[in-house]
Image (cartoon, grey):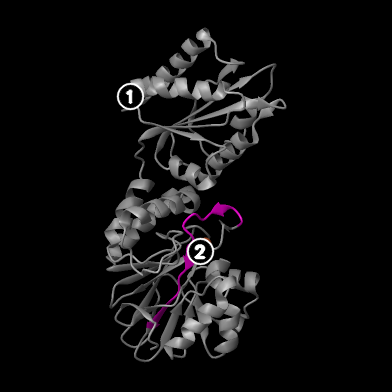
């Protein structure tokens, strides 16, 4: 093995690359902490397997890492066909023509479609099938919908290492192979969960039980650092994916102060009832922050001014995200201001179709809130606080 190889445990090495320059993932998700495309080598006595490839932008670096091991891979285990983990496969099979791509049927279908990998290159495995490398046994667990239909986990039985693919990962670039600062990683992992995993909460809960049953000593995801204390990330996921809710999220956009003042009156009233309130000005935060705050919110209150007879585009985006990310919020309230009319409420409410929170009566003010408006706004917020308390 090369001198720079990073060892996870006996027979397992990290070959991944880190990416600190990319600004957006999927041309959508901001990456404030960068990311990494993790790949691993499992070196058995007889055979060598690489777990996942790398993003197309980093294929050269990833291939260099494989060469540096001095071992000729027999297999590439593809846990997931998305290009950030499969982009290097075409180069890999060119350099190692005798190697086979080991994956499940759905992932094979997607790799053939997305990368035009020839069918004869594959060995297709089923759920719980095994592959023996000589003293290293890989077990495969199909885990569709975290977050694509093709996903699977690979478990190295002897060393109890779980290669969990995107599941339990974080967009977090670091030189440290293992998690050192759990608090820092907690935020990145929560952001990642919110953006990518939250819409699949029922599946997440099911796979959490599967992972706990395997009792891994190490969890090696395909983004971020490796967990040598798996209970840290498993407990965090247990909490995020549970039905527990904690607070009210007010997300708003304000053009001429009216909506901001409404948001502050709502916040003050709820806080006077000892409700924890998070406020997000939608013009000052990125998608990831909105997603992250949606994880624990019991009620989401969305405020918008009326622009050209409709909602502000930032509020439209937030409503779209709310619907797409399917948070566990029990209540949704829409509030806002207008000067001469419009269909802002109908427009925002019409975007929420995939989730069914209880929708509060809309709260609207004509222009800047006057004293009688303040009374109405406080009463609206108080009613929500009372309901939340009645629900326990
Ligand atoms: Fe990190 Fe779904 O790819």
Instruction: Specify whether 311 is left or right of 299.
Output: right
Element at label 2: loop
- List x then y, in percent, for residue 345: 61, 25
Relative depth, front residue between 152 and 311 = 311
The reply to whether the magenta stretch includes residue 273 is: no
Check residue 20 in the rendering and tell me which mark sits there, or answer none. 2
Q: Is residue 387 in view?
A: no
Cα separation, mark 2 vs mark 1, equals 44 Å
Residue 293 shows in this picture: yes
Q: The C terminus is located in which quarter? A: top left
| Horizontal relation, residue 375 to residue 313: left or right | left
Q: Quadrant of residue 133?
A: bottom left
Q: Which mark is residue 172?
A: none
| Sequence-first disc among 2 and 1 | 2
- With 301 as the anchor, is 41 left or right in this view? left
Near-viewer residue (16 or 90): 16
2 or 1: mark nearer the eye: 2
Residues rendered magenta in the picture: 27-42
Please determine whether, in this image, residue 219 is positioned above or below residue 103: above
Of the 4 image quadrants, the one containing the N terminus is bottom left
* Residue depicted at 60% across the width and 21% down the height: 337
Decide: is 54 above or below 327. Answer: below
Q: Residue at x 48, y 44 (%)?
A: 289
Residue 34 included in the magenta stretch of the image: yes
Q: Which numbered circle lies on residue 389?
A: 1
| Ligand 1 closer than 8 Å to label 1 CB | no
């Amino acid at each position: 093995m090369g001198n720079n190889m990073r060892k996870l445990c006996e027979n397992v090495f990290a070959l991944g690359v880190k990416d600190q320059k990319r600004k957006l993932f999927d041309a959508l998700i901001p990456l404030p902490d960068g990311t990494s495309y993790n790949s691993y080598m499992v070196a058995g006595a007889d055979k060598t397997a690489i777990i996942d490839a790398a993003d197309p932008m980093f294929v050269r670096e990833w291939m260099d890492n494989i060469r540096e091991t001095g071992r000729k891979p027999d297999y590439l285990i593809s846990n997931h066909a998305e290009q950030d983990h499969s982009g290097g496969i075409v180069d890999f099979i060119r350099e190692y023509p005798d190697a086979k791509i080991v994956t499940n049927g759905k992932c094979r279908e997607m790799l053939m479609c997305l990368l035009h990998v020839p069918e004869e290159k594959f060995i297709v495995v089923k759920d719980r099938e095994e592959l023996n490398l000589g003293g290293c046994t890989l077990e495969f667990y199909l885990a569709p919908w975290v977050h694509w239909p093709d996903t699977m986990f690979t478990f190295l039985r002897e060393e109890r290492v779980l290669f969990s693919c995107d599941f339990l990962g974080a967009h977090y670039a670091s030189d440290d192979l293992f998690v050192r600062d759990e608090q820092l990683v907690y935020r990145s992992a929560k952001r990642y969960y919110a953006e990518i995993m939250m819409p699949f909460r029922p599946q997440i809960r099911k796979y959490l039980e599967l992972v706990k049953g395997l009792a891994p000593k190490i969890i090696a995801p395909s983004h971020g650092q490796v967990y040598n204390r798996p209970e840290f990330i498993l407990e965090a996921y247990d909490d995020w994916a549970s039905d527990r809710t904690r607070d009210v999220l007010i997300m708003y956009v304000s053009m001429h102060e009216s909506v901001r003042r409404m948001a502050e009156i709502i916040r003050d009233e709820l806080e006077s009832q000892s409700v924890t309130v998070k406020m997000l000005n939608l013009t000052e935060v990125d998608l990831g922050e909105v997603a992250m705050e949606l994880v624990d919110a019991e009620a989401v209150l969305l405020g918008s001014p009326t622009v050209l007879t409709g909602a502000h585009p930032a509020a439209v985006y937030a409503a779209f995200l709310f619907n797409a990310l399917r948070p566990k919020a029990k209540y949704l309230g829409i509030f806002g201001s207008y000067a001469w009319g419009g269909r802002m409420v109908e427009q925002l409410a019409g975007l929420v179709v995939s989730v069914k929170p209880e929708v509060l009566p809309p709260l609207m003010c004509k222009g800047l809130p006057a004293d009688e408006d303040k009374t109405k706004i406080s009463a609206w917020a108080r009613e929500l606080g009372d309901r939340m308390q009645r629900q326990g």
